[in-house]
Every structure is written in C-alpha cells, then in structure tokens.
Amino acid sequence: MSETKNTRNVSRRTVLKGTAATTGAALIGGTFPMHFIKNAHAQTFRGDPGNASSVKLGFNVPQTGPYADEGADELRAYQLAVKHLNGEGDGGMLNTIKPLQLKGNGILGKKVEFVTGDTQTKSDAARASAKRMIEKDNVAMITGGSSSGVAVAVQGLCQEMGVIFMAGLTHSNDTTGKDKKRYGFRHFFNAYMSGQAIAPVLLDEYGAERRAYHLTADYTWGWTQEESIKAATENIGWETVNTVRTPVGAGDFSQYITPVLNSGADVLILNHYGKDMVNSLTQAVQFGLRDKMVNGKQFEIVVPLYSRLMAQGAGDAAKGILGTTNWHWSLQDPGSQAFVKSFGQEYGFPPSQAAHTCYVQALLYANACEMAGTFAPWEVIKQLEGFEFDGAGNGPTLYRAEDHQCFKDVLVVRGKENPQSNFDLLEVVKEVPRAQVEYPADMFGGELGPYQV
Amino acid sequence: MDAIFLQILNGLDKGGAYALIALGLTLVFGTLGVVNFAHGAIFMMGAFCAVTVEKLLTLSVRVRDESVTFFEAYKETPYLEVWFGDTGTAIIDWSVPLSIILAIPVMLLIGIVMERSLIRYFYKRPHAEQILVTFGLAIVLQELIKSFFGANPLPQGAPDIVAGSAAIGAVFGLGDAVVYPWWRLIYLAFSLLTIGLVFSFLHFTTYGMVVRAGMADRETVELLGINIERRFTIVFGIAAVVAGLAGVMYTPVLPPDYHLGMDFLVLSFVVVVVGGMGSLPGAVLAGFLLGILQSFSSMTEVKDIFPGIDQIIIYLVAVVILLTRPRGLMGRRGVMES
C-alpha cells in the first residue's frame, strides 16, 4: 500500500527539482530550444566561428601510408594558402584568380587557422579524423585526401554533418557522379575526362588499329577509369583484348604481366595509381614490353592518370609513357606561374598536381565565403555552384552547379626522355580544351541531396 | 604452351623470393622457438642497404639548374661521375650487386644486436608476447626507415647489361613472345644458390650439425657442454643475412619503400605454416609451390572460371592445410598439433 502511494504522489518540491535539473542539463548539453538563446534569429551551423577572431579549416591528408609524400605536398600547399589568405607572403594566386573578393585579411575579416588530420588512405581512418576535426576543433570546412575511396567516404560524412568538403586528389567518376553530395566539391578532373583527353592523342601517335590490354586496380577508381578509357579507346577504333583486375597493393605484378606477352595485345593500359602504378610500370618495362613488336607495331604502355611524384618513383620506366594530369608546374599561364613561384620560394621545389588542386580548393572556398558574406554552408554552397573563374591554371573554369565538378582544360603528358632535374619529369604534349572533355551532368547518376541537413 | 611455360617460370621466380624469406623465418622458429614478426622488416632493411649504397655512390654536387626560371632550382651531378667519368657511372650502375658486400656484415650485425638486446628476453615467454614485441619492433624499424628515406618507393636499377629481358623462348624451342627479365632469372638463380648454401652449412659442417642437434634436442646438446645459445645467436644473424640479401636483390624488381616488409610478412608466414613450422625443406617447397599456384591462378583462363581466385589462392591453401594437416607439408609430427 505504502509503495503505491510513494510512486503516485509527486510532491511540489520534486517537480521543481526535476525542472531545474532538466533545464540545467539541456543548457549544458546545448540542445535547448533556440528561442531561449541570444541571437536565435540566425540559424546555427557546425563550424560557425561566431564572434571569434579566427576561423578554423580542417586539412585531412594522408600523413602516413602509401600516399604520405603526396599528403605532405598537399599540406605544404594548404599552409601556403593559409599564408596567402592571411595576407602573408607574395599572395600567390590571390593576384591572378578573377573574379576574387579575397583581400588578404583572412576570411570575412577572421584570421585563418587550421588543424590537420591523417587519412592514412583508409576510409574509416579518414572519416574518424574528419569527424574529430568537425566535432572537437569546430572546423568550418574539411579538405584534402589522395584517394577516391577516401573522398567518397569523407564526402558522405560531411553531408551528414553539414560541413563543406573540398575534395583533394580524387579521380573516380563516382565522386561527382553516383556518390555526389551537396556538400562535396571537386576541382580535380576525373577518369571520363582523362579518356576524352587522351584518346585523340593516342589515335595520332599510335593509330586506329590497336589491341589494348587493361590491368586495373580493383576498387572504385580503377573500375571507373577502366570503363572510361575502354569506351574512349574503342571509340577511336581500338579493340579491347582483355581487362584484368589486380588487387590493390599487389607489389609484384609479374603474374599479371606474363599473360600480356601472349595475348596478341599491342598496348598495355595501366589503370593503376600510386605505388601500384610505380610497380606495374617498372615491371612491365622489365618484361621487355616496350621493346616488343606485336602485329607489326611497336608495343606501347599507357598510364591514363599520371603524377610527377609517381614518375619519380618509376624512374627510367616512365620515359616516353603517355598519360593525363590535372595540372603541371611547367604551365606558362600567370596563375600557374604565380603559384609555382610562391611554392618554389617557400619549399625549394615545384608543387605537384595534388598540391595545386588543394591550394585552389582552399582559395575557392574562402572566396565563396566572402561572396556569401557568411560561413553558413548552404549560402557558401550557392556561391560555389555555377562559379566561373580564371587565373588558377588550366584556363577558364566552371564549378558546375548540377554535380559540383570543375570543368577546365586537361593536360596530356609524356614522361621526359632526358629530364634536366629531379622534378622535370613530364612534358606537356597537349592542353586539351575544356569543351572536349565536357559531358551531361546526369551521365553518372547520383543525387546531390538537400542544402540544409 | 608458351603461356604455361611463362607462368611456371614466374611461379618459380616468385617462389624463390618467398622461400628465401620463409627460410630465415622458419630457421629462427626451429632454433630459438621464436615467432619473429620482425622478419619482414629485416627483409626491408636489406632492401634499404641497397638504397643506402646507391645514395652513397650518388652523393652529388649541387649545380644551379638554368632550365628553371621561376625560382632558384638546382640539379645534382654525382661526385663519382665528376671524379672518374665513365668509370664512376659504371660503379653507380652496379650499385645493387655492390650492395651485397655491405649488406652481409650489416645484416649480420643487425640480426645479432636484435637477438642479444631484445629477442633473447622472450625465449621463454608465450608466443603471443613474442609476436607482440617483434611486431612492435617491425613498426619501429619501418617508421625509422620512413623518417630517413620518406614514404615514396625508391627505384633501384639493375646493371644495364642485365636490365632488359632474355629471349628464353628461342632456347627452349618456344615462340619469340617468350621473354623473361634477366634480373628475375638472376634472382631465381641467386635464391637457389642461397638456399643451397644454407642447407650445405647446416648439413655438411660441424657447426651446422650442432645447430641441427640443438634444434632436435636442446637440453642434451647443452648437457654435452656446448654453448648452444651462442650458436643460435649466430643462426639468428644468418637468418637476417639471408632475408637481407633477398631484400637487396629484390630492389630492381620492386622499388622498395618502408612498407615492403609488412607486404611480405603475412605471405611468408603462410609459406612457413604450409611448409611446416620449423621445417627448412618445407619452407622451400611451400615457397615454390605457393609461387606457382599464385602465378597460375592469375591466368585469365583460370580467373574466368573462378573470379578473384588469384587474390585468395594462397590463403585457401593455408586453410586447407591447417584443417587437414596442421603440422604442414613437411612439419615434424607434434608441432602445431595437439
């Protein structure tokens, strides 16, 4: 009897205690309804620097693992971008990008600071470090990375958390195709563009009657690149003899290369990147593929996605090999020259294509905030969508609104026969105009998702 | 026929590398009873002996690079070329074979220091603790290498004379398409020679005989007044030399980076388990067997029937062996069996 009484009779004092406790907990937890908080008329968002004198950006790059050197170069570029944004150094591309509202006084008058995370080129590690930077360091934007697997994973997280992600080096069609996100933006080119850019050069150099054999890294980027390059080469009349998937990080590719010798193919296309590309290319050359004559033609090797750092790793094997790249430090336009000069003076060697795309991404985000007059991501997104600019290398560039993919000129390059120095490894064969690599926005599917999450 | 011949050759060549690494691993397990997860790191350190020698030989003078106008850039010309001209270039060209001279004492020293300063304290500890400490050691070693040499692969060329490929098709009366890189053929010959030397040492010398006796019955050998511990230390050093030389010779095949050891570690353990823990002939046999299986499973004809088989074949074999014959192909009765 007494137990029933105790549970049903709630005293006035208990109610007051309970209310006080709930209010306190809500205030501490920060989940109290907005109409009780000062300045509640403005919508809040993650990464809002509020009244602070500085704003933080999160640089999520591979600091360990197979792409650590590329990550280090990305970080150098970001540090340079922060310097330029804060009005230090020679300003770099702040002097060349047009239109630009940045004044060299930070972003919206707030000094730019940064924190870094290590993606380790692993999706789960990259998501964890991005999440830490968003939740613990209150960053306004996440940027960086050197793999499409990582880019797609981090982009998904950023969409969920409502923080803008400015992708670093990612080349899979999926990043701005089936996995595109409202909060994700890519300045780097993609596999489809590589195919469209390189196919006419391949036709010129090697002719229409060729039989191609693909070795492909077995993950999202490799698959989309194989698909794009296969389609583009078949379009110019080439036959595809075989496509073989190889495990990522296989190390020794010899068991995949020996079947090429007897396949009747006269071109080997290596859809590999990073260490895999260095290894497969080196070994293909060792197997004498480049000295072979097949079907009365000289056997050729093509590496659709090239980077200077990888050409360095492959050494002599990279000489004479054709491929595409997003950007190269030898470009003569004022934007590229300004960036190479700043970077070269700061670090003593020219930047990689990864460094270039990261530097430009940081500046474009900052500029979009200036244009929007706020850090609120949905407003910044609207400024980036459809933004047209020039002076960042690669000619006039469009950030297409429908899929957040940048469209600009693409470079076809070749490994230099007689490099003059350690970084003079690629020569630009052709600057392929933007019009040649464009495609309909809905070609790769996907949905951007909402502006506000 | 051509394709099958090439895959057999490729399998033997891969198997040579696996066997060399597994040989050292199983030697250490057989003598000291230690499961050494740092063995892959030793292989990697061997590869970096070659990198170090190449770096020493190409120590360069910095010259202003006039071809770059954006900023002050420099290019480098090796001192050896400045001082000795073509002879200098030839010495640099032969840097990988020359590295062997450095690698033998260095790897022996690394092995002995490793054993004396760390491993010996773990002889009587459980295998789990040995694995933890040696794995930790492997991480320390690879991070040290990374901090000195960076994370990128560093290509090492074979001497020009053997840089191309051999037209072995003509020798065996097969088609002209049958070619194989000279250096890989050399690697196969080198691995067979090294395996032969290790076996000869263990079987035809008194020292080797005592070591084998120690492997079979350590206590009795000690009761005979032989300092078996010191011999085992030397054996650890020899295992390090074998793995190190395997690493040196592998550099023209695969540009080494700090992670090279980890890439080979799991594979070499599978080889040891399949061959039989502690069995030297087992390690060699399993090395070649798995190399050939891996090679054949990568053929398009096989992959069409079993997609993805090339990526799992060796682990599949390991599973089957562990289920049906836990002591491995040539393992001693009772080892790894209850």
Image (tube, rainbow, N blue to C red):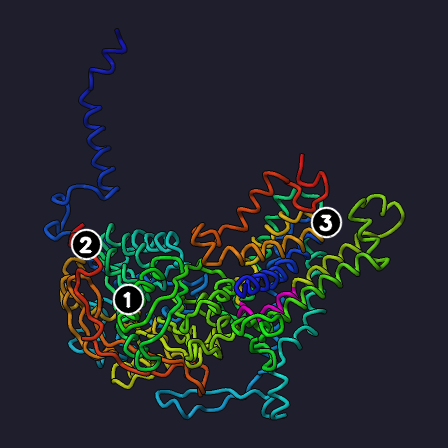
Q: Of residues B170 and B299, which is closer to you in this image?
A: B170
The vertical placement of A291 against A258, above or below, is: below
At label 3, the amino acid type is Gly
The vertical placement of B285 against A430, above or below, is: above
In the image as oriented, which residue stretches furthest toward the left? A41
The numbered mark, 2 or 1, whose residue comes first in the sequence reads 1
Residue A313 x, y percent position in the rendering: 47, 73
Where disc 2 sits, the SS reads loop
**What's the residue at 45%, 87% (across, down)?**
A418
Range drawn in magenta: B244-256
* Residue that label 3 marks: B30
Is residue A421 magenta-colored?
Answer: no
Measured in 3D between alpha carbons, the distance from the residue under mark 2 to the one under mark 3, in whole angstroms, is 59 Å
Question: Pointers 2 and 3 in contact (CB under 8 A)?
Answer: no
Tell me, yes or no, whether dots 1 and 3 are on the same chain: no
Give the left or right position of residue B237, taking residue A428 as reference: right
Chain of residue at mark 3? B
In the image as oriented, which residue stretches furthest toward the top? A1
* Residue that label 1 marks: A231
Residue B59 x, y percent position in the rendering: 58, 83
* Residue that label 2 marks: A447
Give the left or right position of residue A8, taking residue B14 as reference: left
Q: Give the quadrant of residue B294.
A: bottom right
At label 1, the amino acid type is Ala
**What's the residue at 22%, 56% (across, down)?**
A181
Say which of marks 2 and 1 sits in front.
1
Where disc 1 sits, the SS reads helix
Chain of residue at mark 1? A
